[in-house]
Image: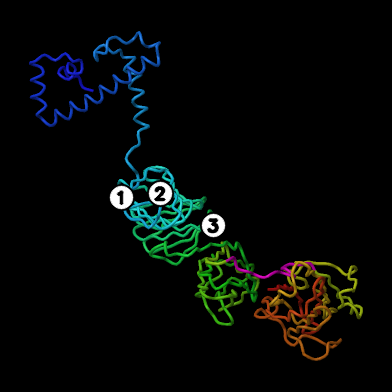
Amino acid sequence: MKKNTLFDNYINDSLTDSEYEELMEKLQDDEIAEKFTNYLIETQLILNAASNITSVAPSVAPEIKETTFKTVSWKILFLAASIILGLFLLIPQKQQFEVIASTSSTFKSGQFINNKVIALDDGTVKFKLPDNSIIELKSPARLIALSKHQLELTKGSLNVHLAPNVKSFEVTTAFGTVEDLGTAFGIHLTKSSALLSVYDGKVRLKLKNNSKEFTVGEAVTFNEKEFQKAIFTEDVFEAQDISLFGLGYRQLRPGQNMELNLDKSAQSIQTQISMSFERDRDFKYQLVATSQGKVIYESSAHTAKDEFDISIPVNNLDNVQITFKALEGSIQNAVLKMQNMQLLTKGSRPYEGDFLIPPSSEWSYFFEKQPEANWLQLTYDDNQWPKGQASIGYGDYDLKTKIGPNSLRKTISRIYLRKVFDLDNIELADMQKLNLNLLADDGAVIYLNGRDILRHNLTDGPINEETHALNRAGIHSGEIIYSNYSLPVDSLSQGKNVISVILYQVGKKSSDMRFDLQLKVY
C-alpha cells in the first residue's frame, strides 16, 4: 500500500479545508478515484482486524496506541495482515464451471458451479471453464476437479473440447490418464475398462507401465495394463458399454486351432503374433480365422522371424476358430505364439470350452505285447503300465516321453495308451460339442469308454494283428500337424470316463512314432 498524505489524513479525519478541496479535485480523475477506493478498503480491513485482535488477544493490546493509522505497530499490522490473508483464502473464488446447456434436473443453464465434485444423476450437462474450454458430462457420472487443468472421471462419459490456448490438460481415470496435446476427445467408462475417442488433434494415453499417443480419428479401449484399438465413434455419449477382456498368452502347433464361443456382441480380437522354431526357419505361413466354416480373416504371408499385430473382426459372430498353415517350406517344430490377446466386446467374456484332457497330459502306455482283452474298459487296472507326459513315442529328439531307443522300430509296430478323466464338475446335459485334437504318427484308433469312435489314417475294417496305418505320416500330416475331430457328446458318461488309443506304424521298419491328444468340451 503506497503512502499518500491526503489519503492518510482522510483516514485519520485530520484533513484541513484546503486539503479536503485538493482531494476532491484529484478524485475527478478516474485513475486516482480507483486508487483512493482501493486504499480505503485495504486500510479499513486492517484497522478492523487490529481492533478485533485487541478484543480477543489482550496480550497484544499494549502494542496498540490510538486508532490512528500512523501509530499502529508493525506487530499489529503483521497479525492483522495474516488474518486478512486467511479470510481472503476462505472467500469463494470465481466459479470454475458455468452451465451453458443442461437436460439434468440438478443443473440449470446460466448456473455457476464451484463444487470440487460434480455428481450427475440424470441427463447431460455442458459446462464452460474460465479459459473457455468446454466439457460435457453424460449421466450417471461423477467428475472431480483436482486442479485448474486436471479432472478425474470416476464414472460415466465425458467429452472435452479445449480452448486453443490451453496446454497440459489431463483427465485421470481408474485405468489410466489422458493427457491433452492440443485436441478434443471423449472418454467412456465401464466397470472393467475405458473407451477413448480422439475427435481432434492428439492425446497421450498413460497407463501403469505404458504410454502411447493417438491422433484424430483413432479410438482405443484400455484398462490398467493394456490397450486395444477400437471402433472410432464421433461421440462417446453414443457408445454402448464396451469391455476389454485380456485373454493372455496362447500358442498353437501346426494343425491345432483356438476356438472361442462369442455372444454376437464382440467387435474384434487383437493379438501380437510371433513364431518360435527349433530347426527349419525357411518357411512362410499364414494365420487364418474361420466361423462356421467360412473364412473371416487371412493374414498376409509371413516368415518365421516376423513379429506383427493382427485384428480379427468378429462382429455378429457366435463362434471363431483361429489356426495357421504353411504356405512355403516345412513348419515342423514351429509354434505360433499369440501374446497379449484381447477381445473387444459389448458382452461377456468368451467361452473357450473346458479341457477334459489338456495339452501335455500324463498317459499310461504299454508296447511289449497286446494287453488283456478288457484293457478298453474303465474298470481295467493299468497301475503296472509305465506313465509319461505327451508327446509320447520314440525316434524323435523333441518328445517329452521317449519309451525306448530308436532300435524299437525293429520290434514295435503299435503302442497302447490309456487315460481316465473325470466329468464330475461339468453337467453332461449342458454339453453341446466335443472336440479332439490328435497328433498320430502314423495312424490311430480312438476308443471312448470302450466304444470305437474315431480312426485316423486307418482302415474301416476289423482291428487285428495285421492292422497298420494306411499312409506314412509326413511333415504336412500327423507327424507334426494336429488333426481336429468332432466327437459325439453322448459317448461321454457323467463321472469317470476312459479314453483308449492304439497307435500304429505304417510298416515294421518305420523310423519313429509319436502321439499326443487333447479333448475339450463346449
Q: At x 84% / y 72%, what residue is drawn?
A: 365
Question: Is the C-beta separation of discs 2 and 3 under 8 Å?
Answer: no
Nearest to viewer (mark 2 / mark 3): 3
Residue at 55% x, 82% y is 294
The verdict on residue 157 being magenta is no
Q: CA distance from mark 1 to mark 3?
A: 33 Å
Q: Would you place residue 319 above or below residue 121 in this image?
A: below
122 sits to left or right of 321? left
What is the C-alpha distance between the residues marked 2 and 3?
21 Å
What is the magenta range? 348-362
Residue 408, image x and y in percent? 83, 75
Element carrying mark 3: loop
Is 178 or 241 nearer to us in this picture?
A: 241
Tell me residue 519's x, y (percent).
72, 73
The C terminus, quarter of image: bottom right
Question: Can you tell which mark lies on residue 170?
Answer: 2
In the image, 493 versus 126, the foreground residue is 126
How many neighbours does mark 2 have within 10 angstroms: few (below 14), some (14-19), or many (20 or more)?
A: many
Q: Which residue is mark 1?
A: 110
Dot 2: what SS? strand
Residue furthest toward the right? Answer: 372
Residue 146's place in the image compared with 390, above or below, is: above
Q: Which residue is mark 3?
A: 191
The amino acid sitting under disc 3 is Lys
| Vertical relation: 311 (above or below) 454 | above
